[in-house]
Image: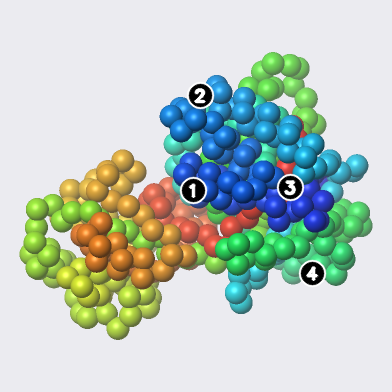
Amino acid sequence: MAIIRPFKALRPQAEQAAAVSAVPYDVVNTIEARALAADNPLSFLHVSRPEIDLPDAIDTYSDAVYEKAASNFEKLKSEAPLFTEDSPSLYVYRLQMGEHTQAGIAACCSVDEYDSDIIRKHERTRKDKEDDRTRHILALRAQTGPVFLTYRGRDDINDLVIRSQKEQPLADFTAPEGVAHTIWRVSQIDRDDLIEAFNAVPLLYIADGHHRAASASRARAQLASKKKTDGDAEYNYFLAVLFPSDQLQILPYNRVVKSLNNMADAEFVGELSKRFEIANAASPVPSQKGEICMYVEGRWRSLTLPPATTNPIDPISSLDVSVLQDRVLDPLLGITDVRTDKRIDFVGGIRGTAELEKLVNEGRAAAAFSMHPVSVDQLMAIADANQIMPPKSTWFEPKLRDGLLSHLI
């Protein structure tokens, strides 16, 4: 069963929601975060990326950064202001980007279910990023950005979500990137029905936010060790928004390489022809799984494996990002670990293929690879098999915003 728990959200009033809300802390670097928050003292980036209010040379993992996060949080509570709901509630959080719409339930989920794999993972976390968010949670005694969860949808849950959207929203605005964010409080009757409906959902899956979830687990372990275990304590739960899988939109996570391992462009293309069927690409965007589009020598080519070489039984090796890694990046370019190798960069699909062309044409990359997006079914199959997807395999869009609903622990 999947446990969802109402919580007393810390949130801004409707008229301040747009100003307070911010992009997720991990989609911008310090320079970008500083620019976004420069003219907005209410931006939640002052809390989620507090180094923007400290000297440029500051170590972003220093004690001073977490102390600044806590002081900025208290300041924002007063100046926005932020207030805490009187009673525990569930919320509907709807995202609209162009013609795409998805609506999920904002709630708290069980750390125990995360630890026992009822909430399933598909990504390996990094200790330094876990350390950072764990310290951030403990400094604030709050989870300020939700984990993005998904599940196999149910009609009874969908009906309750639709019904809740008929009420007056608590927040309704369009962010600068063009995504509309709307939040409603769920009625008490529907709240209880939703809790019961989720009891029939066998598994949840992390779509985005593996480090947030892992850090909530680690923060719980530290807090619980300091006092007698309290199973009802807020630190036993973490903030999440749960969307049905058939509403999600996954964009590709494209790749650019900075050098061709001392090969000329023509030599590189010749080596690829030994591994793929190569043709001029009708479009820079792959039309189907099993096709990779490559930009080199000023034009796009389509790379396709011969049919007999694919292995549909293995959910990892059959991913297009795995094919690129196993047949190009590692054997031809010597890029064995994409997490650490400085010769490769990743470009979220939201930036489009024109960004890939620009990087190559300006000499900042030697070649670019446009990928077909991973499907939600592939993601869940890999999580169900207790396997880990290759790094930078999925780019979920639209993204939730930080600061609209926070969970105090």
Label at residue 405: 3
Label at residue 168: none
| Distance Cα–Cα, label 1 vs label 3 | 23 Å
Q: Earlier in the sequence, mark 1 or mark 4?
A: 1
Q: Give the labeled residue for mark 2.
A: 62
Q: Are marks 1 and 4 in contact (CB under 8 Å)?
A: no
Does the rendering let one see residue 160?
no
Q: Do the residues labelled 2 and 3 touch (CB within 8 Å)?
A: no
Which of the pair 282/61 is nearer the observer?
A: 61
Q: Give the labeled residue for mark 1.
A: 32
Point 85% across, 69% down: residue:
166
| Distance Cα–Cα, label 4 vs label 2 | 45 Å
Q: Is mark 3 on a helix, strand or loop?
A: loop
**Type of amino acid under label 3:** Leu
**Type of amino acid under label 1:** Glu
| Distance Cα–Cα, label 4 vs label 3 | 20 Å
Where's residue 156, x and y in %?
A: 78, 66
Where's residue 26, x and y in %?
A: 51, 45
Q: Is mark 2 on a helix, strand or loop?
A: loop
